[in-house]
Image (cartoon, rainbow, N blue to C red):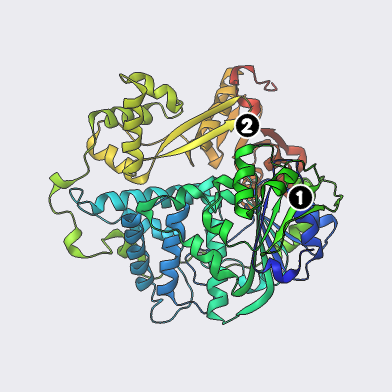
Amino acid sequence: MIEEEDLAKHMLTVGQSGSGKTTLIYTLLSQIDVPYWAFDLKQDYRHLINEDPELLVLPWTELEFNPLAPPPGVPPRRWAQVFSEMFGHATSLLSGSKNYLLKSVIELYRFYGLFDECSPPYPSLHELEAVLASDKISYVRKKANYRDTVLNRVEAMNLGAGTIFDCSEGFDLETLLQRDVIFEFDGLNRDIQNFVMEILLAAVYEYRLAQTHRDTGLNHLFVLDEGKQVFSVYKERQEAAGIPSIDDLTAKLREFGEGLLVADQEVSKLTDSIKANTYTKALLPTGDRKQFDAMAGSMHLTDRQESVAQELATGEAILQTGNDDPVRVSLHEYQIKKEVTDSDLRQRQGGRWQQLSSTPRQRPPGFEDYHGSNPHSTDDIVSDPDQALSLSREAKQLLEDVVEYPFVPLTQRYDQFSSHHVGYDAKQELTDTGIVTEHMLQAGSISRKLLDLTERGRSFVEDNLEIDPSSKGRGGVVHRFWQHQVKTAFDEADWTTKLELFDADVYATNSQVELGVEIAMEDTEREVEHIKDRLETGFDAVWVVCRNSQVRAGIETRVADADLDTSRIIFRTVSEFEEPENVSIPE
């Protein structure tokens, strides 16, 4: 019923949860003869390795990708524009901020010599952040707002992405295009999910364009099973941001044999562009009148056809290809057991991850001097100290509270103001100027939003407030929170503790035993290196307190593969330390 050449013109599938969308996608992927990339936000597709042993599943903790490295054959100046547009769309930047970002990227490329010869090393988002932070601009000018907004987005992106962007060159694009790949983004911040998905789409299109891979058939398929994250109608309606580049990309991809298979529960939240540019549409049971009407309208169903569509049962769909009449079909029952755990995945795919090569991040000679000065024109340099950043009284009050009490929930901080609205405005002022970033902390029954100082925030506090901005502990505010929770638990058990002693996140001793505690926020090889270092230091035991059970399972597998002395390693999860006074600590 659905031909491969039809998928080259894109397909849209809409239905409520449990209606059979994912099953339909499983069936289509099992029948096509071209490679596909699936962007997976819920770990739905990893289980296909039981059917396809050649399938590559890449959790985001294993992904290495530099969005500032131009795809093969793409000129740096063109890629700078593409990157700026995609980053701006994913993070909701308006035109002025996107233009400022573009200028910064071009200046960074110029310093790296990429306009003379497009070859590595390439700058990463970390170098871009350093350049943005060093741009000493005048805060009486509107440009200051652009810089602060862009810096806030880039800094948050680097903080939340783990090691994804920590490379000069990521995994080879041409190699990945030749195989079936599942990109798992579960656990990533939504803005980062959106950006990585959109920049990968753009990278493939620009690569195809540079290599003149024009084709009317299907060469490769993208699968997006939560389409509204990328194709959001709200961003399409944001007039100040201009027409989203992703809309333009949707129509252009089909010229190069790149198909899109987009699925979602809420068609009303999808862009008009994706609805208009999908040749094949499948309507499954929706259970919501608004969503049904939106899809029925997109398919131009008659009253009689709508009446039939409203009676669909699970496993049935109304299918329409091009201008053909819609037909009622029964979907193939694709049986698959969803039983692949993180540990299973690592055991079966770990060898393939190691075979993927990347190039470490490099900074050319003179970079420190470059980003220590203003990379832009000299007329933007602050010469008058009175032009320095100024904050409202409420913003300063909130900032002091963040420094003094770093782990207080954001909503509780608002209680010190005359109203929560005043507190919210103060918070917005701090985030918009790049003084703080917001971080969500969730574990067990704990759910709170925390504020963390940026480098710019620390500098402001040092220069303008009579308090010490240094933090106790290391890493981001969520990591430090759990350091303090663990330390408190050992304190309550009458152990002697200290943060960062002998490089351990928490050092604890009861005069007979010395423990080193590591807080593991992500399942990465770096955590295993930390465990190994603590063992070599001579601790009697090493506690590894993991962000969740998935991280724990992954690190346990890594530790087993590393052949470490597991008798001296004890694993816990952070949720066990929600109430430090109730944690059972052995004597």
Front position in the image: 263 or 209: 263
- Locate the C terminus by quadrant: top right
Q: Which numbered disc, 2 or 1, marks the residue closer to the eye?
A: 1
**Circle 1 is placed at which residue position?**
317
Q: CA distance from mark 2 to mark 1?
A: 44 Å
Front position in the image: 216 or 454: 216
Residue 169 sits in quarter: bottom right
Residue 143 in the figure: left or right of residue 398: left
Numbered tag placed on residue 123 in the rendering: none
Which amino acid does the dot numbered 1 rest on? Ala
Residue 341 sits in quarter: top right
Mark 2 or mark 1: which comes first in sequence?
A: 1
- Locate the N terminus by quadrant: bottom right
Q: Residue at x 67, y 22 (%)?
A: 585
Q: Residue at x 74, y 52 (%)?
A: 318
Q: Residues within 10 Å of mark 2 (few under 14, many from 20)?
A: many
Residue 363 visible to the viewer: no
Which amino acid does the dot numbered 2 rest on? Val
Q: Give SS at disc 1.
A: strand
Can you give x and y, in whole percent of width and height, for residue 258 in the image?
A: 63, 70
Residue 203 in the figure: left or right of residue 570: left
Front position in the image: 273 or 235: 273
Can you give x and y, in whole percent of width and height, for residue 246 in the image?
A: 50, 60
Can you give x and y, in whole percent of width and height, for residue 509 in the image?
A: 60, 28
**Circle 2 is placed at which residue position?**
574
Q: Give SS at disc 2.
A: helix
Label 2 close to label 1 by CB (< 8 Å): no
- Position of residue 370 relative to residue 490, above or below, is below
- Position of residue 409 relative to residue 141, above or below, is above
Can you give x and y, in whole percent of width and height, for residue 439 in the image?
A: 48, 37
Residue 101 visible to the viewer: yes
